Image (tube, rainbow, N blue to C red):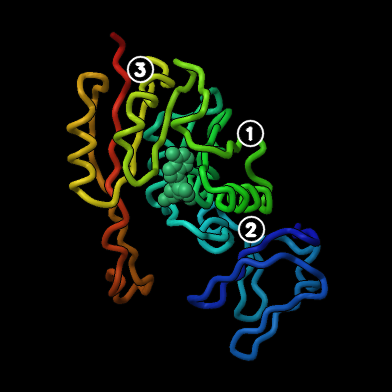
Amino acid sequence: MFREGEWVLIRYEEKRYLRRLDPSGSLNVRREVLRFRDLIGKPEGIRVGRFEVFRPTLEEIILLGFSRKTQIVYPKDAFYIAFKLGVDRNSKVLEFGTGSGALCAVLSVIAGEVHTYEVVEEFHRIAKENLSRFGLGGNVKFHLGDFLEAEVPENTFDAVFVDVKDPVPYLEKVHGVLKVGGVAGFLLPTTNQVSALLRNFGGKFGGVEVLEILVRYYKTVPERLRPEDTMVGHTAYLTFCRKVGS
Ligand code: SAM
């Protein structure tokens, strides 16, 4: 049942809204009004007029609910990254920079423990607020500071993900804090950045893969099922590798 104060995802035809169930609140779309007090105590997945009301998924929370002052890792990439890193409830994962906390939120849902570093105080604060507003991040340790200067114990993390402009200066430290066999991942928007990364791996990382995730949505009309006219053509290239012992 929907409870007062919880977040709900409201669909109205192609539109989507993320709202908190404040009993005095309402949503007005094309002159149709949905009163939130009428939803409290009702089962999830309810239809009221042309409104449909659900509990939000993590993708909807990130895309519609997170404040963003930085570029984020989009859910299509973040969901893939989380499993590609081999993360589960027993894993200890490190990521930087935190940015708006989008990838951090995804990792926190499946990992045992997440450590995230952000050098800009404002982004660090916003990311913390983004996660806590939606009841996420109980297993996240938010560190304010430059990852390069942080004291991080060696051979500690099962996986590390790097989302900064130039990851090359961090490679040695990433290698150091990873457990042998652990997975490292990198997100970079351009191929020349990926080339620079590959050139600097040396012999320290094995099992190197570079890929990108293309997602094409379809118009959901059974009689003329076909792709949407526009799509997100590019977000970033993903590089994954494993720490090889010496
Ligand atoms: N992955 C984030 C998300 O999904 O919301 C977005 C990360 S954003 C593209 C890159 C972030 O890295 C910026 O917020 C920047 O301030 C931070 N950053 C850059 N260098 C850093 C460093 N050496 N240590 C910690 N954070 C750093």
Three-letter code, disc 1: Asn
Q: Report if the CB atoms under discs 1 and 3 are less than 8 Å apart.
A: no
Where residue 192 appears, x then y in whole percent? 18, 47
Q: Which mark is residue 139?
A: 1
Distance of label 1 from label 3 (alpha carbons): 23 Å
Q: Which mark is residue 55?
A: 2
The quadrant in which the C terminus is found is top left
Distance of label 3 from label 2 (alpha carbons): 38 Å
Q: If you read the primary sequence from the N terminus, does the residue marked by circle 1 or circle 3 appear first? A: 1
Name the secondary structure under disc 2: loop
Q: Which mark is residue 181?
A: 3
Residue closer to the observer: 63 or 40: 63
Name the secondary structure under disc 1: loop
Q: Residues within 10 Å of mark 3 (few under 14, many from 20)?
A: some
Q: If you read the primary sequence from the N terminus, does the residue marked by circle 1 or circle 2 appear first? A: 2
Residue closer to the observer: 7 or 177: 177
Q: Is mark 1 within 8 Å of ligand 1?
A: no
Where residue 153 appears, x then y in whole percent? 51, 18
Q: Residues within 10 Å of mark 1 (few under 14, many from 20)?
A: some
In the image, is 115 to the left or to the right of 201?
right
Three-letter code, disc 3: Gly
